[in-house]
Amino acid sequence: MQPTRQRLPGELSFLAVLLLASLFLLWTAYGISKFESLTSAGAFPMFAAAIMVVCAVLILRDAARSAPTETRAGESLAAQFVRRLTPPVVVGFTVAIALYMVLLQPLGFLLASYLFLVVSMALLGSRRWGLNLLVSALALAAIYGIFQTVFSVVLPSGTLLQGLFNGAAT
């Protein structure tokens, strides 16, 4: 016998938004060429969006039939939804990625990426700091070598460090 699946907090709302987004994409795809023929520009996008709509309806139907997850004593559905969607690792990585994006321009690719890699390893639970520092340096050296020399990609050098070195040279 298959165990009954319990509906997660916020699952119905998410699936309803997914269905609305699928319907919007179907309508947008229809606007490309009004489905003039199977070889028209909008045929494949309409087909893909129609499959999304059908799948969203089926998943929504199954979720609506399943029993809701029992809430903890004194915890609202909204609080349980937030708790399940925002575990500390996800919040930590979101903050780390945001900081990486902000620091990439002033610190440059090398320093910002190195700090991001070290912090990421710590967020994932590694407490071997020496190994973290070494692996981050080796991975970054490989990435830098490949992108700089093989692909000839110009990586950000950083405005903060340029200002420090240019000020020291004058």
Image (cartoon, rainbow, N blue to C red):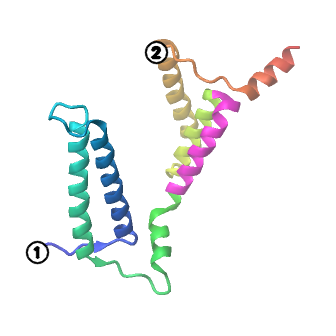
The first of marks 1 and 2 along the sequence is 1
Vertically, is 42 above or below 15? above
**How many residues crowd around disc 1 within 10 Å: few (fewer than 14), some, or many (20 or more)?**
few
Residue indicated by mark 1: 1
Under mark 1, the amino acid is Met
Q: Please identify the dominant SS of the magenta region.
A: helix
Vertically, is 29 above or below 40? below
Q: Which mark is residue 151?
A: 2
Q: Which quadrant of the figure has residue 101?
A: top right
SS under mark 2? loop
Q: Toward the viewer: 169 or 138?
A: 169
Relative placement, left or right, of 121 versus 25 is right
Image position, residue 30 (x, y; %) = 27, 43
Under mark 2, the amino acid is Phe
Q: Which mark is residue 47?
A: none
SS under mark 1? loop
The residue located at (49%, 23%) in the rendering is 142
The residue located at (45%, 70%) in the rendering is 81
- Whole-number angstrom distance, CA of label 1 to CA of label 2: 55 Å
Image position, residue 15 (x, y; %) = 33, 63
Any part of residue 131 in sight: yes
The residue located at (34%, 58%) in the rendering is 20
Q: Quadrant of the C terminus?
A: top right
The segment highlighted magenta reads 90-108
Asked if residue 95 lies in the magenta stretch, the reply is yes
Any part of residue 128 in sight: no
Relative placement, left or right, of 80 versus 101 is left
